């Protein structure tokens, strides 16, 4: 702990990735990529399993309740920081499950999607209220399809729509976040990951958003460069292998 505390005393940036879910597995080593984009000197990871690229790992147990997971995250992160503040929190949690209202696993999938997306996002928001510096960045992960109906993946759409609502609320006055903090969400359509390529080998991959592009965005936004306004839902629209950022109304 003393070694980590000394690291927090230097003048470079401090980062934290809240990394639950399948997207995390594709963005890792996001911490390594962030180090290449910005003057990052400390990266913490909150996840179900350790991230070898992180300086500190805070583990949560999937069997724990929402409140128990929050308590574990607060204890682990605040203990590691020892009074220091974070510049950015990246919540790249996610996962996917399909199913309409008649699916036998509808409620089961809804529960899974809620835990993967909403639990982690709410924990990140509360953590940000305690450890994010003034003018810092809180990034959550929504989904572009959840801006409209998702009849074939109801649990997924419902959970991601809840994340969108959370971001809108965090961007409003009296949200409880520190002053001048930017809270936003990325809304990808399809991310170009090995898992997606495995299960959709014949899809048009030129419409998929590369993970390196996403990590580059995080790096710029963490430094305050080209950062959208707080409360933004930023759609990642990729066509012909070129990605455009489009704010959702």
Image (cartoon, grey):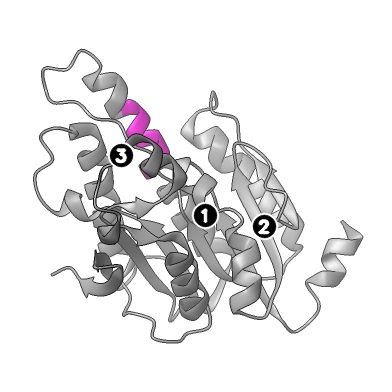
Q: Which residue is mark 1?
A: 27
Q: Residues within 10 Å of mark 1 (few under 14, many from 20)?
A: some
- With 154 as the anchor, is 133 left or right in this view? right
Q: Main secondary structure of the magenta part?
A: helix
The stretch drawn in magenta includes residue 178: no
Q: CA distance from mark 2 to mark 1?
A: 14 Å
Nearer the observer: mark 2 or 1; the answer is 1
- With 175 as the anchor, is 89 left or right in this view? right
Q: Residues within 10 Å of mark 3 (few under 14, many from 20)?
A: few
Comes first in the chain, label 3 or label 2: 2
- Asked whether residue 177 is in view, the answer is no
Rendering coords of residue 100 (x, y %): 13, 26
For the N terminus, the image quarter is: bottom right
Q: CA distance from mark 3 to mark 1?
A: 19 Å
Q: Identify the magenta region.
A: 111-117
Comes first in the chain, label 2 or label 1: 1
Q: Residue at x 22, y 49 (%)?
A: 161
Rendering coords of residue 87 (x, y %): 58, 74
Rendering coords of residue 31 (x, y %): 63, 62
The stretch drawn in magenta includes residue 113: yes
On screen, residue 43 above or below 40:
above
Nearer the observer: mark 3 or 1; the answer is 3
Q: Which residue is mark 2?
A: 44
Comes first in the chain, label 3 or label 1: 1
Q: Nearer the viewer, residue 229 or 248?
A: 248
Q: Which mark is residue 200?
A: 3
């Amino acid at each position: 702990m003393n070694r980590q505390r000394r690291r927090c005393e230097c003048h470079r940036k401090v980062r934290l990735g809240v990394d639950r879910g399948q997207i995390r597995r594709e963005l890792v080593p996001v911490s390594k990529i962030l180090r290449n984009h910005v003057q990052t000197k400390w990266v913490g990871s909150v996840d179900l399993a350790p991230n070898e690229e992180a300086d500190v790992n805070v583990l949560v147990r999937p069997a724990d309740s929402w409140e128990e997971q929050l308590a574990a995250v607060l204890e682990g992160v605040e203990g590691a920081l020892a009074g220091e503040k974070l510049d950015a929190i990246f919540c790249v949690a996610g996962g996917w499950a399909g199913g309409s209202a008649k699916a036998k696993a509808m409620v089961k999938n809804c529960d899974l999607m809620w835990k993967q997306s909403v639990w982690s996002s709410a924990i990140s928001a509360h953590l940000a209220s305690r450890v994010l510096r003034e003018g810092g960045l809180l990034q959550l992960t929504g989904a572009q399809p959840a801006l409209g109906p998702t009849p074939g993946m109801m649990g997924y759409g419902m959970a991601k729509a809840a994340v969108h609502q959370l971001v809108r609320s965090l961007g409003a006055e009296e949200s409880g976040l520190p002053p001048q903090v930017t809270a936003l969400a990325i809304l990808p359509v399809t991310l170009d990951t090995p898992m997606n390529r495995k299960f959709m080998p014949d899809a048009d991959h030129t419409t998929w958003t590369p993970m390196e592009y996403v990590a580059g965005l995080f790096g710029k936004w963490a430094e305050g460069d080209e950062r959208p306004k707080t409360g933004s839902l930023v759609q990642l629209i990729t066509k012909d292998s070129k990605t455009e950022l489009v704010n959702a109304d």
